Amino acid sequence: MSSVALAPVAHAEDIVTYEIVSDQVTKANVEYYDHSVRQSLVDVPLPWRMNAAVSDPRSVSAEVRADWRSSIAALPAWRPNNWVTVRIWSRGSLLCQNTLDVGNATCYGNTPLQMGPEIPR
């Protein structure tokens, strides 16, 4: 009787680029996935861009979220037209783009949203 040990399965990861831009909002709280772990950053200056490793760019393992409600909370009254765009890029191709003025916006690699007005890169 022989015993064979199996090596652990390696999972390849792809690189995506997360991007958050705005002409009106100067900072946001950011959440994103890198190496299958949710990361959180507070009061990130915009525009913001970073590369991250994900198991599959076209799945929920690629996610970026911006929350700028705290940056507009000090205003006398909440106002629309504080647009923020979140994007996910993979190998030079746009996977997701979402532009909102409601205080938060999210993009997932498996949801090719392209909502709202275009905010340039």
Image: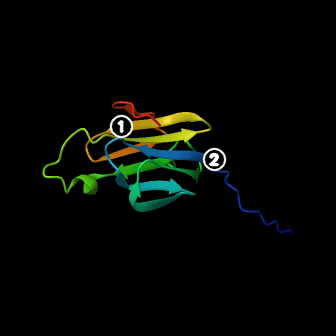
Q: Secondary structure at mark 1?
A: strand
Q: Residue at x 63, y 47 (%)?
A: 14
Which percent across, then down, holds residue 90? Answer: 58, 39
Q: How far apart are the alpha carbons under marks 2 and 1?
A: 25 Å
Q: Amino acid at mark 1?
A: Thr
Q: Is residue 63 left or right of residue 57?
A: left
Report the label total: 2
Which percent across, then down, holds residue 86? Answer: 42, 42
Residue sitting at the far left: 76
Q: Residue at x 62, y 38 (%)?
A: 91
With respect to residue 76, does 42 lie above or below?
Answer: below
Q: Amino acid at mark 2?
A: Asp
Q: Mark 2 or mark 1: which is in front?
A: 1
Residue 60 seen in this snapshot: no
Q: Circle 2 sits on which residue?
A: 14
Label 2 environment density (alpha carbons within 10 Å; few <14, some 14–19, many ≥20):
some
Residue nearest the observer in this picture, 43 or 5 = 43
Q: Secondary structure at mark 2?
A: strand
Q: Is residue 109 left or right of residue 68?
A: right
Q: Residue at x 51, y 36 (%)?
A: 95
Residue nearest the observer in this picture, 1 or 79 = 79
Q: Is residue 101 left or right of residue 40?
A: left
Q: Circle 1 sits on which residue?
A: 99
| Mark nearer the N terminus (2 vs 1) | 2
Residue 57 seen in this snapshot: yes
Quadrant containing the N terminus is bottom right
Q: Residue at x 38, y 45 (%)?
A: 106
